[in-house]
Amino acid sequence: MDFMELDGLSITLIALGILAVLVLFAGAKVVPQGYNYTVERFGRYIRTLKPGLSLIIPFIDGIGRKMNMMEQVLEIPHQEVITRDNATVTANGVNFYQILDAAAAAYEVAHLEHAVLNLTMTNIRTVMGSMDLDQLLSNRDEINQRLLKVVDTAVSPWGLKITRIEIKDIDPPKDLVESMGRQMKAEREKRALILEAEGKRQAAILQAEGQKQSQVLEAEGRREAAFRDAEARERSAEAEAKATEVVSNAIASGNVQAINYFVANNYIKALEGLAKSPNQKVLMLPVEAASVIGAIGGIAEIAKETFGGDGKPAPRPTSGRPPSTT
């Protein structure tokens, strides 16, 4: 009897031990890294379990939602968008989001991914539809920033953070692409013509500046040459005046050779001018050789009287008449 009672007690203790282990396992919850679990008591949210080992009341509390707290990527499928200038394009993209509040993400919206996807697609059509096609193709960063701001504000009550929205492809229709190609080609040809015209204009300006500078330098040269010619003529006139003065003084002193020198000098200059005439080929004048020789002899006598026989100047006569010769 005692053995049977001991066996029944042992079985009871073993059963209680097994039950305690089962209760312990039912109340112990291990949450992996990157996840949060919501705890519900009789269907009502009470708290959130963080990564690690946590205990709940078995059979009363239960795990509600297992929320992924890591950053997630949501593919935005292709959709047609009508721009402000009535051009139809096809666009797709990606949405990067992260859950910050597990309870809000679990209980504030149903079908979280579907809601974020539809919200992003709707705002893509809104933002891209408010822009012209040229702006759409050239301002992709602006589109991304506007989408990020609008969608992030909209999902904030759901405990989400939109980290980035990127437009992947913008595909205009084929005929529109061909038209844009022709437009781009025409624009490049236009710029080429403008650059060519600008180059010709600049070359003409530089050429005109060069001609102007050349004319200025040429005028400066002519002015300098005229100045030097005038200076030469002035010096020549001074020399001529000095010579005339010397001859006049000699004549005033009664020196006949001076008169002969003056007449012979002008006579020879006149002959030289006639000989240098461009339309004069033959010169025939009744010139007496004796007169020319006599004039040359008069020049020699003047030189002798002026400088003397030993190369020194001779003294001027004291009387007004020429010295007598024997």
Image (tube, grey):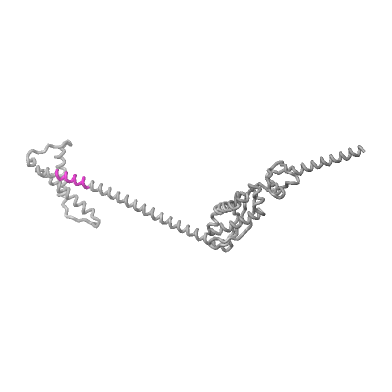
**Which residue is located at x 88 percent, y 40 percent?**
8
**Which residue is located at x 56 percent, y 62 percent?**
87
| Above or below, 80 relative to 304 | below
Residue 252's quadrant in the figure?
Answer: top left
Judge from the rendering whether residue 35 lies leftward or rightward of residue 238; answer left or right. right
**Which residue is located at x 22 percent, y 47 percent?**
233
**How many circles with numbers are drawn on the protein?**
0
Residue closer to the observer: 67 or 133:
67
Please report the bounds of the magenta region as a residue range.
233-245
Residue closer to the observer: 113 or 180:
113
Tell me the quarter of the image containing the N terminus.
top right
> Was residue 234 drawn as part of the magenta stretch in this picture?
yes
- The spot of residue 291 in percent (x, y) is 14, 49
The secondary structure that most of the magenta stretch takes on is: helix
Judge from the rendering whether residue 213 lies leftward or rightward of residue 139; answer left or right. left
> Was residue 230 drawn as part of the magenta stretch in this picture?
no
Residue 326 visible, this angle: no
Residue closer to the observer: 9 or 191:
9
Residue 320's quadrant in the figure?
Answer: top left
Judge from the rendering whether residue 193 lies leftward or rightward of residue 181; answer left or right. left
Judge from the rendering whether residue 287 lies leftward or rightward of residue 168; answer left or right. left
- The spot of residue 319 in percent (x, y) is 7, 39
**Which residue is located at x 75 percent, y 43 percent?**
27
| Above or below, 231 relative to 139 | above
- The spot of residue 104 in percent (x, y) is 64, 49
Residue closer to the observer: 116 or 239:
116
- The spot of residue 91 in percent (x, y) is 60, 58
Residue 107 visible, this angle: yes
